Amino acid sequence: MNNTRTTWTIACATLMGALFVPTPKVEACGGFFCQLTPINQAGEQIIFRKDGDTVTAAILIQYAGDAEDFSWVVPVPGIPELSVGSDAIFSALEPATRPQFILETNGERCPGDNNVFFGGIGSVAESAGADDGGVQVVERLVVGPFDVEVISSDDAQALATWLNTNGYDLTDRGEELIAPYVAEGMNFVALKLRQNQGVGDIEPLIMKYQSEVTQIPIRLTAVAAQDDMGVIVWLLGSSRAVPLNYLHVIPNYTRLNWYAGTFNAYASYQGLITAAMNEAGGQGFATDYAGTEFDAASALPTVETYTNELVSLSAVADDAEFVAALSSSFVLPQDKVQEILNRELPLPVGEDPFIYQVPELLGDTYTEEELSDARVAIIVQINDTIVKPLEEGLAVFDGNPYMTRLYTTLSADEMTLDPTFSFNPDLDDQPMTRIAMMDLSCDLGATSWKVTLGEGTGRNGELVIEGSGDPPGFSPPVIDQEAMWRSERVTTSGPPEVETLRTFGVARVIGVNAEPTVGCGTGLFGCGGGAIGTLAITMLGLGLLKRKR
């Protein structure tokens, strides 16, 4: 097992989060700016909370590489208050707010039809003010696992030189990409991992700052974004959030794969959004959900879950058995636990981490005093690096504010404008659940069926498909219609101003469509956006995680 840790470090890093410009070294490619090859950023997830003119942003960071190669730079207004959150919040939040697609069926097909059909189922601050070649180090801090410098400059070239000199290796486009933010008077938060901190210690960064607008500096992402990169933004405030300078886009749900369960329907939805955004010109957001029904207390992990587990582990009298139980815990995040064990009980050279799971091997490897001292330090670190970050992250949801989840996909050539968001109290909620109805009948020995869109689609009661023969099974029918139904401009009050509104006729389908839908994502096997692509990516991710551990 001890050689698996290095197996994947030759791959470039993958970072999720839009408010940053990672700045790597050559081999591990620790972020967007890489001297060798820019990495592809697989997606971005950000939580914003707006209270008056105070913005709190929590940014998910995912990184694979060597700890010493990790660095990260993000523009921010003013001097932010910094802390770290918890990966566990994002892991729970995304599926808990994901759109759900339900196909209700009525009637029966003819008895001879056998087509299988699936219905929808804390920080320490140090003052700093020295000017270094046109760059001012405004503040130096220790924030969780990070060494942080807040820097300022009115000279993009000087800032780029400072970043390169201090180990934040920019690509050739680095100065070009940071220049607009320098011109806007923004400061920059620059992160590195502290000495003796491992990749497993990385947590989401939480920034609180004063700003009238909520904005993603997406232009910085263009240097390494993959085509049609997914961006999920959660906005917490007093009412429904809207994109101000991007279009609001509603897809054509006729093209959705309603027929193979909600999991596959969501995979189809992601591809449908990509196609709709491309038709809208590449700069738009869809509303996945907007409302007050989301309950953070029941949907997100609780501090009590971790503290109860820690109390249970602490009751284990033998120190070696305590370490073994901790190393096998299914409640505490094992990437964090393993980093703590590596620090407090470093393995002898060449020994396998499996030792941590076996009390007898622990007793053979360490003295009773070493195990006892390590136990005390381990409990302190669990509180500091696992429990407290969860508390910080959950505080963003205090009071259960109105939540909006927005989704889009963007390619590098579309990242020319930083999306800005605000709130519009005059807009209705967007339910998390979308519904369609399929009515079946058997007339003169032949099955006929029709699909009507329901609540959540924006076209409640509209008949969209009429078919004869077996109804769709696992693969959806080919629908020769555009992916975008409506695009609109939204402001901070009043109804949207419609830019494009398409009217579609009823699609006619004859017989069973045995071929998968052509076009990215609208069908089950569509260009990585379908269920098979999603499952393969998920399994690959689990494999990588397992091998890394």
Image: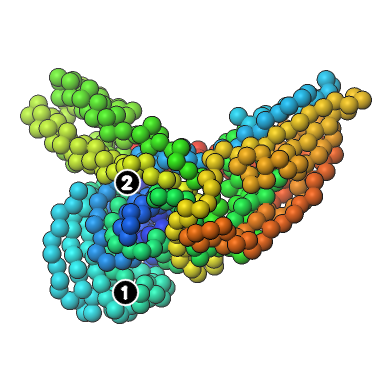
Q: Residue at x 29, y 75 (%)?
A: 159
546 is higher (above) or lower (below) than 322: below
| Total marks placed | 2
Q: Residue at x 32, y 60 (%)?
A: 53
Tell me the quadrant of the picture where the C terminus can be found.
top left
Q: Which residue is drawn at 24% across and 55% down?
A: 82
Tell me the quadrant of the picture where the N terminus can be found.
top left
Which residue of the protein is positioned furthest toward the left in this rendering? 369
Q: Which mark is residue 58?
A: none
In the image shown, does 14 or 445 lie closer to the viewer? 445
Kind of residue sitting beneath label 1: Gly
Image quadrant assignment for residue 137: bottom left
Confirm whether residue 477 shows in the render: no
Image quadrant assignment for residue 378: top left
Q: Mark 1 points at which residue?
A: 185
Q: How crowded is mark 2: few (under 14 residues within 10 Å), some or many (20 or more)?
A: many
Kind of residue sitting beneath label 2: Val
Q: How crowded is mark 1: few (under 14 residues within 10 Å), some or many (20 or more)?
A: some
Q: Name the residue under label 2.
A: 396
Give x and y (percent) for residue 387.
Answer: 24, 37
Eye-nearest disc, 2 or 1: 2
